[in-house]
Amino acid sequence: MTMRGRVWITPEVVSWTPRQEAGWVVDQSALRRGYTIWQHASDRLKAGANEMDRADAITTLKRCLNQRLRVIEAAYKLRRFLRLNNTRYLEALSQLGLARPMLIQHLLKVRNAIEHEDKAPPRLRRCLEMLDVVWYFLRTTDRLVGAKTHMFILEPDETSRYGLEVEVVIKRVWTASVRGWLPHELLSYSPIVGCFGVRPDKLQAANSWKKQGQHLDKLDTDIYLSGSVTEIPDKIAFARAYFEAH
């Protein structure tokens, strides 16, 4: 097949089931630090905790939350990739399946009232509920902080003859490359709004492989594609697939 400057993959491919293919464990000290801060808040909320204890616990939970958010941002550069400001950050984490923003925002509201308006902290029972909220946030994001995906595969199902391997490198920005087999109808050779752009280094129909006795399970029109991703129009969907593969 003649090499082309760019091709476009339909968004359907990004909705396929992701699974991790390769990754690595990262420094665990940042993960443990979140629980150390959380434990301090927990210690302040023992039976008989007075108003000052509860206020200290709420402030500490906010610090615990901030520490984990900083670690996530340092690893994944979501602000730059998704073009987020502070008000949209928690909303984006929710869209990525990483947080429940309403509960976290309530904690932030309570902490700000204590810190800036000298309001009394909630009763012990409510403080313990917020302690649980932060604990679940830590547990939900442990997999992101403790390890990092380098490569994942998108497949329609486990028995499909199609699949796309995606390699992601996150430094100052996200860069990605892909390789795998796709049905020809999920590729376009002209720009389409909402499709993912790829600059191919290999683009070959299955019929040319089958003449050599290879990939005989493929249809003649199936396409093998490898190349660098040039356009990611739906960055939330792409990042969600990446994180779901963890």
Image: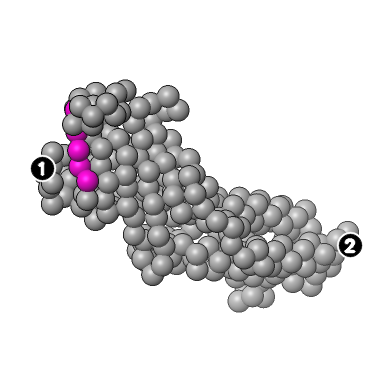
Count of marks overlaid on the render: 2
Which residue is drawn at the image coordinates 36% and 65% (left, top)?
173
> 86 or 116: nearer the eye?
86
Counting from the top left corner in percent of width and height, residue 49 is at: 85, 64
* Residue closest to the far front: 212
Which label belongs to residue 2? Answer: 1
Mark closest to the chain's N terminus, 2 or 1: 1
Which residue is drawn at the image coordinates 16% and 39% (left, top)?
188
> 133 or 148: nearer the eye?
148
Residue designated by label 2: 48
- Does 50 sit left or right of 32 as displayed? right
Question: Which stretch is magenta?
Answer: 202-207
Q: Is residue 11 above or below residue 149?
A: above
Which residue is drawn at the image coordinates 34% and 55% (left, top)?
176
> 2 or 13: nearer the eye?
2
Magenta span main SS: strand
Q: Is residue 28 above or below residue 160?
A: below
Element on which disc 2 rests: loop
* Residue closest to the far right: 48
